Amino acid sequence: MREIVLDTETTGLDPKSGHRIVEIGCVELVNHVATGNSYHQYINPERDMPDEAYRVHGLSLEFLSGHPVFAAIADDFLAFVRDSQLVIHNAEFDMGFINAELQALGRDALDKARAVDTVQIARRKFPGAPANLDALCKRFQIDNSDRELHGALKDARLLADVYLELIGGRQPDLELAEEDKAAEAAVVSERNHRAARPHAATAEEEAAHRAFLEKIKDPLWLAPG
């Protein structure tokens, strides 16, 4: 099973307001194991960089102007993600930006059903607790000490670790194996269940018992009441 853990950095919060992607980072997982294969690209947004966005990721327009526009990297990006499941923290945000970029080029949007939202997983697993990436790294003791600024590839790598913890730890198959053993034990227990054996005495046994009692003087078994 191939999954792509994905993160983006942008010029703002809403592609409908003209904001654009400035960085994409992806990490490949196969059967819930990081392969070391990744995709990373800075992107020229062809617009200004608001101060509030710059304070988040530190990517200046001067720096980004030396990198390709989204139209130039779209094919490489799509070739990397292929038809794999996408693992994204707050999937609605990143998918919204990616699809806005694709549709501006006349390309098909990515199906949102492909995305696994780790924010939703965290909220179901830890209701009421913070579900941001820093809080989850702290919960799972994942080192994010160099995350002074957001970075798409850096955050995708951290999210990959968080995702594996959310689904049961670095070796989720072990948990499934324990569940399989419990299910097997339940089946065996049900299969070995037998109805209680009848222990009522036969007519011959009752007659022999009465004959025996008649030989005993005042047996308790024949006491009145």
Image: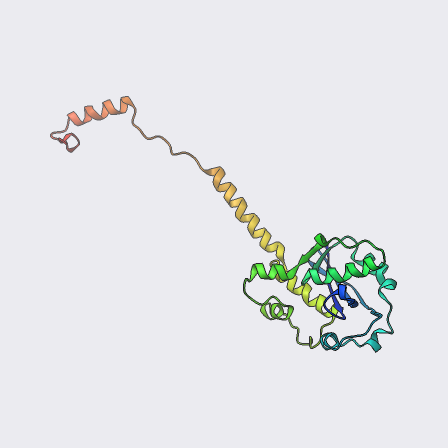
| In the foreground, 104 or 148 | 104
**Residue at left offset 75%, top offset 66%:** 8
| In the foreground, 37 or 101 | 101
Taking the image as drawn, is residue 90 in sight?
Answer: yes
Q: Is residue 128 above or below residue 180?
A: below
Q: Is residue 99 above or below residue 63?
A: above
Residue reaching furthest to the front? 17
Quadrant (top left/top right/bottom left/bottom right) for the C terminus: top left
Taking the image as drawn, is residue 35 in sight?
Answer: no
**Residue at left offset 48%, top offset 42%:** 189
Position of 42 with respect to 115 (left or right) is: right
**Residue at left offset 63%, top offset 68%:** 132
| In the foreground, 225 or 138 | 138
Q: How is the image coloured?
A: rainbow
Position of residue 45 measured from the top left corner of the image (x, y, whole percent): 82, 69
Task: Using the rendered view, name the quadrant where residue 28 is placed.
Answer: bottom right
Position of residue 200 measured from the top left corner of the image (x, y, whole percent): 31, 28
Position of residue 177 measured from the top left corner of the image (x, y, whole percent): 59, 51
* Marker count (numbered): 0
Task: Using the rendered view, name the quadrant where residue 124 is placed.
Answer: bottom right
**Residue at left offset 70%, top offset 56%:** 115
Position of residue 36 measured from the top left corner of the image (x, y, whole percent): 75, 63
